[in-house]
Image: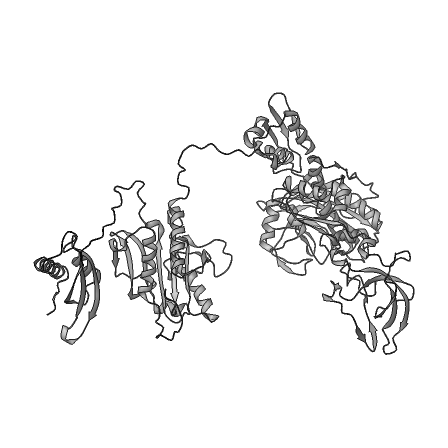
């Protein structure tokens, strides 16, 4: 919310500086987002006099002017304003000045139809002071030539921009801010005259009847209206226009500007109707599905949960949010009906969300407005209308009853010390609460505190402690270190937090870029990747393609890869560590680490290279990425099961599953299924993997044995090659496992270095060649010992795979 220093001082008697006020505002919880000079954009404009204005010889609507801008010499200016005359004073811009209303920088040395022009005489619209562009600004004869216009016009003040939390509806008006600053000790609060205005005759508009169906939500609580006849509406006074512009509002006309002034000044939204445009009886009811033409020039369809002020023809105003075009006040208005009503904050917020209207009225009313200001707010607006527009006020039209919380809190004064550590005396606590409008009563250490009507957010003793703390000053809260309970600090990060960190680092070191994608995906994508069930569909989806909670990270990563490909980056490597939702239960939320590689984005690099043909990514790249993460997490991939079971999204023959036993699946890897790639409009090779970080076994708190020391053998290793012929369906893992188990003491490593299929190995057969590394530790191996181990390897592989040694 924005307000000027001058506006604040109308409600607060203070000598505090801008810096002191800014610091105090932040200290009491009204955080200052910015402090700026009000007329900063108009700093270069000066008061000038038109010494001579003569018709342009080459134009019938331009004038050649001699302008005195206080520089000591006259300046030639070509001006097209119809009101420019010799001797008048106006606002002048030198070359190089930015013209905000036209959004350009004024150039010098310009020649207009043969006449030089070295500056510009400005209209109010060109300075964004109003919509008046019919002529240049005309200043009084005593305006000092050469003085900055912002200084002369008094628009060089200071504007505060503060952030209002959702519970502080009382601070959405300048008066409420002044009340807090006065309680903080920065000045004295000035009272506003809101006494009843004497009425002159009965109101042509009777109290509005309530026409709500039983069980319908009723947003309106109390409606107070005042008919004022014979007003003279028109542009509002300069001081009022300047005040509204300073906080970013565009002046409309006097009556509308008064409603904005009361809304911003006292946090009390109002609305004004042109009474002559109302047809029949005004009533309060819920909408009947009508279309509503609002003042923002948009048409909204209203439902039966939204309260409207209506006449015989339909809605005049969407209650508490925005008025309608049909009853809008214009400069031609002569009879006006002013509304000041009390509303249900929750229902106002609900209607605002449904329509998407964000108005100043909604901003304040959904934060709760002081119900005690309903009738006084109407009286204040009436007084301002009579002062600025004249007219005859009629009897108020009041219906409904206000809702006053009347909250009383039993407040142990010791809570201030217990919750904040502040040593505040009982008398000071009572004084602080009293300055804020609270009434504390009772003897002893517990006070019965009555909460003022403008603070419905205060409902418990902790809220009262907060009020005392912010008035004493948050920076005065003592900072004391917590006592250390252990000599060795315990582990801070949880297991899953550590796993996320380790997985991110491992994948980043392999050249994958981290992506963060939406947790919501389309129903079709959710179905493709194992989700799409009703329990995981959103009841209030934010978009048609974000209807389901994601069962996998891959849809988001594949969509990101597709967007990159569409923009010319076909080779990408992306990963994400995040939440997936396997059900709508708490235990169904798992943390996955997933990645995709597309095109030629292999770990060694992507793109074409002179040294050879660029290879496309494949299943082994995905497996290597997955193995790297498991290795970083302390899981030995050689000790887990690598099964030829492809995921639902993977090519059937080019994918696998990593498991611990028959029930625990750690992850999947493989190449994207061609049919799925076609559905997702992805071309080229795609390899992907998924790891369920929650499925990994919990690390042991205390290791059962220490890590063995490093053993380096001084003896030369021995290498032996074997080739076996076996059925094509035999897995490589079974061959390696059998060979390693033949002699665990001597066999250090087994590698497959050749696979061959052909006619001379037999139909449905393959030849697999392995290299076995023997590492002696105590002595050099003899021929007999080598032959014994070789025979054991042949026997173990033959028994496990059903193959035979190739001759």
The residue drawn where x is 90% and y is 63% is 88
Q: Is residue 635 above or below residue 24?
A: below
Quadrant containing the C terminus in the rendered view:
bottom left
Q: Position of residue 660 (x, y in %)?
A: 26, 52
Residue in front for this viewpoint, 88 or 748: 748
Q: In this view, does 781 lie to the left or right of 693?
A: left
Q: Which residue lies furthest to the front in this view?
A: 714
Q: Position of residue 296 (x, y in %)?
A: 68, 59
Q: Position of residue 751 (x, y in %)?
A: 21, 62
The residue drawn where x is 64% and y is 60% is 299
Q: Can residue 369 be seen in this view?
A: no
Q: Residue furthest top?
A: 444
Q: Can residue 726 be seen in this view?
A: yes
Q: In this view, does 99 lie to the left or right of 722?
A: right
Q: Residue furthest left?
A: 784
The residue drawn where x is 14% and y is 60% is 797
Q: Where is residue 646 in the image (x, y as percent from the top left)?
A: 29, 62
Q: Is residue 465 left or right of residue 547?
A: right
């Amino acid at each position: 919310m924005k307000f000027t220093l001058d506006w604040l001082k109308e409600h607060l008697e203070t000598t505090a500086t801008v810096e002191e006020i800014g610091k105090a505002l932040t200290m009491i919880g009204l955080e200052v987002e910015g402090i700026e000079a009000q007329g900063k954009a108009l700093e270069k404009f000066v008061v000038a006099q038109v010494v001579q204005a003569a018709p342009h010889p080459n134009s019938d609507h331009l004038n050649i002017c001699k302008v005195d801008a206080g520089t000591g010499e006259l300046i030639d200016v070509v001006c097209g304003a119809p009101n420019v005359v010799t001797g008048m004073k106006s606002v002048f811009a030198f070359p190089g000045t930015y013209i905000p209303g036209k959004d350009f920088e004024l150039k010098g040395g310009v020649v207009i139809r043969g006449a030089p022009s070295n500056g510009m005489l400005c209209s109010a619209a060109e300075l964004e002071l109003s919509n008046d562009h019919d002529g240049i600004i005309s200043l009084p004869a005593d305006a000092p030539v050469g003085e900055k216009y912002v200084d002369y016009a008094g628009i060089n003040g200071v504007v505060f921009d503060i952030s209002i939390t959702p519970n502080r509806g009382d601070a959405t008006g300048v008066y409420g801010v002044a009340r807090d600053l006065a309680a903080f000790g920065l000045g004295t609060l000035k009272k506003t005259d809101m006494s009843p205005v004497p009425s002159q005759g009965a109101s042509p508009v009777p109290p509005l009847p309530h026409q709500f169906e039983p069980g319908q939500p009723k947003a309106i609580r109390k409606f107070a209206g005042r008919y004022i006849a014979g007003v003279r509406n028109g542009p509002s006074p300069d001081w009022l226009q300047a005040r509204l512009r300073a906080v970013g509002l565009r002046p409309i006309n006097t009556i509308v500007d008064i409603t904005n002034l009361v809304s911003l000044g006292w946090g009390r939204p109002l609305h004004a109707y042109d009474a002559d445009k109302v047809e029949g009886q005004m009533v309060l009811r819920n909408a009947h599905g009508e279309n509503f033409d609002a003042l923002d020039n948009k048409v909204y369809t209203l439902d039966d949960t939204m309260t409207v002020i209506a006449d015989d023809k339909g809605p005049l105003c969407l209650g508490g949010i925005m008025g309608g075009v049909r009853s809008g006040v214009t400069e031609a208005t002569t009879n006006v009906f002013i509304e000041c009503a009390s509303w249900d904050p929750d229902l106002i917020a609900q209607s605002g969300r449904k329509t998407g209207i964000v108005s100043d009225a909604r901003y304040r009313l959904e934060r709760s407005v002081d119900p005690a200001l309903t009738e006084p707010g109407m009286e204040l607006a009436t007084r301002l209308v009579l002062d600025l527009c004249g007219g005859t006020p009629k009897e108020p039209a009041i219906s409904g009853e206000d809702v006053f919380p009347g909250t009383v809190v039993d407040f142990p004064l010791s809570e201030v010390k217990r919750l904040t550590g502040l040593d505040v005396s009982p008398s000071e606590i009572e004084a602080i609460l009293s300055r804020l409008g609270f009434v504390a009563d009772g003897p002893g250490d517990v006070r019965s505190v009555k909460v003022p009507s403008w603070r419905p957010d205060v409902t418990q003793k902790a809220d009262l402690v907060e009020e005392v703390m912010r008035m004493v000053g948050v920076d005065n809260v003592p900072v004391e270190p917590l006592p250390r309970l252990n000599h060795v600090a315990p582990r801070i990060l949880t297991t899953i937090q550590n796993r996320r960190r380790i997985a991110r680092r491992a994948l980043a070191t392999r050249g994958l870029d981290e992506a963060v994608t939406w947790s919501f995906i389309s129903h079709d994508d959710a179905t493709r990747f194992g989700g799409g069930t009703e329990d995981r569909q959103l009841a209030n989806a934010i978009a048609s393609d974000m209807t389901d909670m994601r069962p996998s990270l891959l849809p988001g990563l594949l969509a990101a890869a597709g967007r990159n490909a569409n923009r010319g980056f076909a080779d990408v490597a992306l990963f994400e560590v995040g939440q997936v939702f396997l059900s709508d239960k708490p235990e169904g939320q798992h943390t996955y680490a997933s990645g995709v590689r597309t095109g030629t984005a292999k770990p060694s690099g992507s793109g074409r290279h002179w040294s050879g043909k660029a290879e496309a990514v494949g299943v082994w790249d995905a497996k290597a990425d997955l193995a790297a993460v498991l290795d970083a997490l302390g899981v030995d991939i050689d000790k887990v099961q690598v099964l030829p079971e492809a995921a639902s999204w993977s090519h059937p023959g080019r994918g696998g599953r990593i498991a611990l036993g028959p029930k625990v699946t750690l992850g999947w890897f493989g190449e994207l299924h061609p049919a799925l790639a076609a559905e997702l409009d992805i071309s080229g090779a795609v390899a992907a993997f998924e790891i369920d970080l929650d499925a990994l076994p919990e690390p042991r708190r205390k290791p059962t044995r220490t890590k063995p020391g490093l053993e380096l053998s001084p003896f030369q290793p021995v290498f032996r090659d074997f080739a076996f012929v076996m059925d094509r369906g035999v897995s490589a893992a079974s061959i390696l496992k059998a060979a390693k188990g033949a002699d665990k003491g001597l066999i250090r490593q087994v590698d497959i270095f050749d696979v061959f299929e052909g006619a001379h190995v037999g139909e449905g057969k393959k030849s697999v060649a392995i290299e076995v590394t023997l590492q002696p530790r105590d002595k050099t191996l003899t021929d007999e010992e080598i032959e014994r181990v070789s025979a054991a390897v042949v026997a173990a592989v033959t028994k496990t795979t059903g193959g035979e040694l190739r001759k």
